[in-house]
Image (cartoon, grey):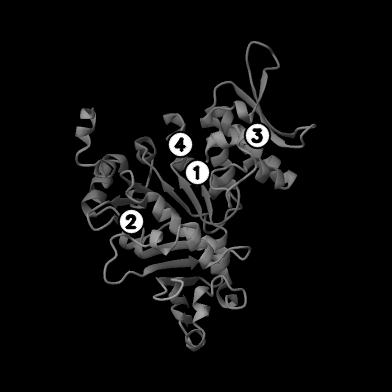
Amino acid sequence: MLLTRIKLKNWRNFREVDVPLGPRAYLIGANASGKSNLLDVFRFLRTVAQLDGGGLQKAIKERGGLGKVRSLHARQDPGVRIEVELTDSTPTEPTTWRYVLAIKSESTGQHRALVSHESVERNGVEVFTRPDPSDRADPDRLTQTHLEQINNNAAFRPLVEFFSETTYLHLVPQLLKFSGEIGSRMLENDPFGQGLMQRIAKTPSKTRDARLRRISGALAKAVPLFSELKFEQDAVTGLWHLAANFSHWRGHGAWQKEDQFSDGTLRLIGLLWALQEGDGLLLLEEPELSLNDGIVAHIPLMIDRILRDRKKRLSARQVLISTHSEVLLTEIADGQTVLLIEPGVNGSTIRVPDSDELTAMAHGLNPAEVMLPKTRPQALEQLGLFA
């Protein structure tokens, strides 16, 4: 299943959003323009759809309340609205879906977040819409979505499964290097890669070994002197560790555990593992961090190759990527996959390349040359005068 369009109203930085999405989307924009906030829409829907401890109220609470989610630029109509269109292409029955969720604050009492509108369409036919007569008779029902209720979502269960399988990765190497000192507390869904060792350990051994062999082959090309990667359990503590062998003047080389790996090596391992793990939407936050430009240049091709080769599926796994990297954008083959976020006095806007920009890219310029300069703040030249 693939997301084909997203529409937003009053979501964080954005008053209005309406953009198409394909199997790949590269989000670019200035700092604090809203790249992470756009990705957070899909994390929000994941929490709402999760059957184990999820739901609308939890998703709102995790973000500090509806007031923190609602755009500061919202005016007469302060409600938050999320609308997504999806397609599920199968050989027998191509299916299109449309899910809409609108939220408002309770006007009296506890000021809870309430569902002001929720609906699902399948192939253009309405499956349900809310509020319905039961909701009007019992307003407390509006504190929950049908998406999170297993008794009510049977007719659109594929949407629930798609949203709940979303993966977000912004690996912080220090959380792996100093896991012993930091402690065992881990954020739910592990957005920063702290539980990478546990996720690898829980993977069936045959699948795990195959994935690690592919990662080892990539590291051999990207990391100087690297020769071998192992995943082993400490005999004393019982904890699992990655160990890499680096060749030197001695014949057997030197073994290092993950706490001795470079930040770039850990981030590359995390990226390669995430690309092979799961089938749902994958959200990558600035995958170029800590990596050599030569490696960064291969990230777009690497993503396409890894996902294309996975069982030859008809629709590859969808990946949304935020980036500031000129090198990464230079290697993008299709300029239409770039989404430009432009901040303004009435909130940020998102757009695809216009006709002039597409013409420039068709005549030999790459997305980095055409689109990236538009992300530069106007007064950036004054930054060097800071005193």
Find disc 2 in the rendering and name its residue: 13
Evaluate whether residue 91 shows in this view: no
- Choose mark 3 or mark 4, whichever is in front: 3
| Element class at badge 3 | helix
Q: Earlier in the sequence, mark 4 or mark 1?
A: 1
Q: CA distance from mark 3 to mark 4?
A: 33 Å
| Element class at badge 4 | loop
Horizontal side, residue 235 vs residue 142: left or right: right
Q: CA distance from mark 4 to mark 1?
A: 18 Å
Tags 2 and 4 touching, CB below 8 Å? no
Q: Earlier in the sequence, mark 2 or mark 1?
A: 2
Q: Which mark is residue 298?
A: 4
Tags 1 and 3 touching, CB below 8 Å? no
Q: Which mark is residue 180?
A: 3
Label 1 Cα neighbours within 10 Å, binned few <14 / some 14-19 / many ≥20: some
Q: Is residue 306 above or below residue 176?
A: below
Q: CA distance from mark 2 to mark 1?
A: 21 Å
Which residue occupies the foreground of this view, 177 or 111? 111
Rendered location of residue 222, percent (x, y): 53, 29
Residue plotted at (71% across, 37% down)? 240
| Element class at badge 2 | loop
Residue lying at the far top of the rendered structure:
249
Rendered location of residue 54, percent (x, y): 58, 63
Label 2 Cα neighbours within 10 Å, binned few <14 / some 14-19 / many ≥20: many
Which residue occupies the foreground of this view, 325 or 360? 325
| Element class at badge 1 | loop
- Choose mark 1 or mark 3, whichever is in front: 3
The type of residue carrying mark 3 is: Gly
Find disc 1 in the rendering and name its residue: 170
